[in-house]
Amino acid sequence: MNTSLLTLWGYWDEIYQRCTRLKYVEKGNNIFRIVPLRYRGESLVTSDGHFIHKGDLIVKIHIHNYYFATLCKGVTDELKVALLLRRHIMHSLPKLAAYLDEMNKREEIKGIVGTTMLHKGVQPLGFSISDVPMSALFRFKRWYLRLLLRLIHPDGKRRVQTWSQKMPLKRVYMSKELLLNRYGRGRKETSGERF
């Protein structure tokens, strides 16, 4: 990515962070930003048999795209980008689990939920996948994520055109129990604000 464009994105990301309720799990060392909210979609069944229903409290997860773009700066190989993303997700999940485990409404939280085009390979990590309705909101989000993919990916424009057919927007989710059992390990080393 062009250095000037990355710098401008950094300024925008700071404004976006201040204008939303997104919280860092660990700023500068975790690929996730999160916000606790009430789930509004269709009922979900996780891979370990738990349910997430409309109105349940969840932790909405967002990949910190600007942070990931800075990590990808100078990387021109597609496979290296994919491996870099997977490595940082694996690094971030235990800290996300520790963060959730210390939240004030921990007992009420049903799980973590996100929407992404980069859902290939997440099931072995414990996530379940489902379709999202193509409402105006999700159409806008798909356009926005395609734009980010074009900016981050070393093959930019061509990859967006290819991937847009093979990688539709999906909902990815995991129960709180699975997250804590698989990634918790009693860790307490996270920092940042608590909900």
Image (cartoon, rainbow, N blue to C red):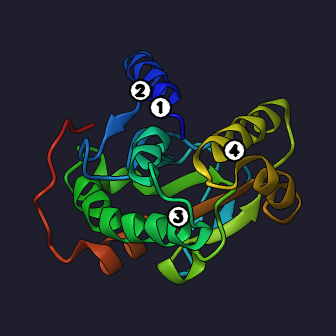
N-terminal of the pair, mark 4 or mark 3, is 3
N-terminal of the pair, mark 3 or mark 2, is 2
Q: CA distance from mark 1 to mark 2?
A: 6 Å
Q: Residue at x 57, y 52 (%)?
A: 114
Q: Residue at x 53, y 34 (%)?
A: 2
Q: Residue 189 falls in which quadrant of the image?
A: bottom left
Disc 2 residue type?
Gly
Residue 163 is situated, as x and y percent measured from the top left of the image, at 80, 60
Give the label on residue 106, or none. Answer: none
Q: CA distance from mark 3 to mark 2?
A: 20 Å
Circle 2 residue: 10
SS under mark 3: helix
Circle 3 residue: 81
Quadrant for the C terminus in the image? top left
Disc 1 residue type?
Leu
Could you tell me if residue 96 is visible in this image? yes
Circle 4 residue: 150
| Contact flag, marks 4 and 3 (Cβ < 8 Å) | no
Q: CA distance from mark 1 to mark 3?
A: 17 Å
Which class describes the residues within 10 Å of circle 1: few (<14), some (14-19), or many (20+)? some
Q: CA distance from mark 4 to mark 3?
A: 13 Å
Residue 77 is situated, as x and y percent measured from the top left of the image, at 57, 67
Residue 31 is situated, as x and y percent measured from the top left of the image, at 38, 52
Disc 4 residue type?
Arg
| Contact flag, marks 1 and 3 (Cβ < 8 Å) | no
Q: Residue at x 31, y 52 (%)?
A: 30
